[in-house]
Image (cartoon, rainbow, N blue to C red):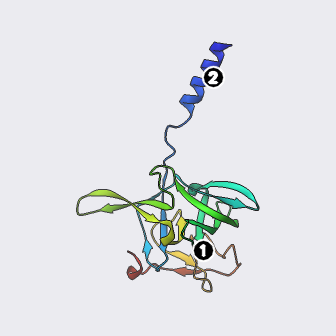
Amino acid sequence: MKKLFLIVLCVLIVSVPLSAETWMKGVIIRMDGKILVPEAIRGDTELWGKFQDTKLRIRFDKLLVITFLKHNPMFTSDIEVINLKERAFIIKDTSLVNTWNKYGGVVTYQFYDPINDKIIERTIARKKILQIILDYDRGDLKQNPKTGRYYPVSFNVDPVTGEKLIWASIDEHMIR
């Protein structure tokens, strides 16, 4: 019995990945209207909060759109998320946790520095972010003309309001 337990334990240890680090394509829209188009956004960031009075943890790589609805100094807010099935829901009293750099309330992203020919890693405080669109592949986005919110190009209507979306090119003056 002891041997069987050790064998099962060894198999579990070997089968569990040592790192949950995931880099994803995406765009970050800041509160001031500037748009960050990084090489990648770190996907090991999680949102912790409540959905219908149930505690919830959800990883960025399970979402398509994250919109921060209100902010307060304690780094909690209500957020609207759209999951991979294009369903929208609101998570209350959310905290954002980045499990790698151990800072709450930040999103980590990478930029390519052509002068030094290297990738630079940066973080942005969650309180400066209005929206994050994941699976964004450098080009156009779609936008709700009434709310101003952005969505991936695969969306034809706003999943929250039902409004028809229009094409929205990112102007050079919008990119930081």
Residues under numbered marks 2 and 1 in contact, where contact means CB atoms less than 8 Å apart: no
Residue under the point 51% across and 58% down? 104
Q: Quadrant of the N terminus?
A: top right
| Closer to us: 92 or 34 | 92
- For label 1, the SS is loop
- Mark 2 or 1, closer to the camera: 1
Distance, label 2 to label 1, CA atoms, is 47 Å
Q: Amino acid at mark 1?
A: Lys
Residue type at numbered disc 2: Val
| Structural crowding at the residue carrying mark 2, measured as other residues with C-alpha within 10 Å and reported as few (<14), some (14–19) or many (≥20) | few
Of residues 83 and 91, the one nearer the viewer is 91
Q: Residue at x 38, y 82 (%)?
A: 173
Residue visible at 70% across and 60% down?
50
* Mark 2 or 1, nearer chain start: 2
- Mark drawn on residue 70: 1
The image shows residue 112 at horizontal and vertical percentages of 33, 61
Quadrant assignment, res 113: bottom left
Q: Find disc 2 in the rendering and name its residue.
A: 8
Q: Specify the farthest residue to the bottom.
A: 146
Q: Nearer the viewer, residue 35 or 52?
A: 52
Q: Is residue 90 left or right of residue 149?
A: right
Left or right: 151 as drawn, with respect to 109: right
Instruction: Residue 138: name its quadrant.
Output: bottom left
Residue 151: image location, x then y, percent: 58, 72
Judge whether 145 appears above or below 99 on screen. Answer: below
Q: Residue furthest toward the left?
A: 115
Residue 122 vs residue 60: left or right?
left
Element marked by disc 2: helix
Question: Quadrant where the C terminus lies?
Answer: bottom left
